[in-house]
Image: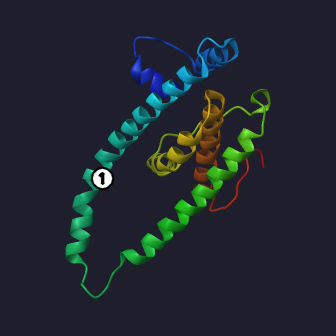
Amino acid sequence: MHRLFAELEPSLTVTEQNLEDRVRYLLRSNIFDVAKLERLRREAVPSLDEIATAEDAAPQIAEQPANVDAAVNTPVVVDSNDDGTVAQELELEHMRSILEEAIVETRSTPLENRPRLPRIALSKRNRAVVRALNPMLVTYLEASRDLCETNSILFGSAIGAKLSTAGYATGQSSAQPGE
């Protein structure tokens, strides 16, 4: 949320904690009625999708020549991408299960008892994990009823992303923070 805010309002300097405090204040003070908050949430979701689409477009364009070269150089009888596709589907399914577990756990944890989010190093692998998780979040965000639930979903997805990247790095299937 902080990165999105910084992109939308680059002239304002706001820390993550300050932004979280402002959201919490808006929720507790009932400045906006439920209908207004729902409308704002729906307006925010497409903008997140547009950003994800724009980020995904550049790497896909760069990857296309390699895929074309591989297709040209691969014999017709042999399909070398089957193993890679199955492995990718298994990884995505594993990531989806980690995401669901993290969101369920986060929803049941009160805001004041949630751990501080760990930083995720900026790397190609981590960006790929985030790109893979973004489409999975759409279902959860569309079903979200209020900002608090949206916050829980985003917090859970950040934990899910961290666990997914930890699983990639260590080869473990179910890493838990603090273990």
Percent position of residue 46, x then y:
41, 35
Q: Is residue 57 above or below residue 109?
A: below
Q: Is residue 134 above or below residue 95?
A: above
Q: Quadrant of residue 58?
A: top left
Left or right of 92 on screen, residue 149: right
The amino acid type found where label 1 is placed reads: Gln
Percent position of residue 75, x then y:
24, 84
Badge 1 marks a residue whose secondary structure is helix
Q: Is residue 171 above or below residue 139?
A: below
Residue marked by disc 1: 60
Left or right of 6 on screen, residue 137: right
Residue at the spot 45% in from the left edge and 48% down from the top edge: 131
Percent position of residue 74, x then y:
25, 79
Percent position of residue 40, x then y:
49, 24
Front residue of this view, candidates 33 and 179: 33
Residue at the spot 56% in from the left edge and 23% down from the top edge: 35
Residue at the spot 57% in from the left edge and 40% down from the top edge: 120
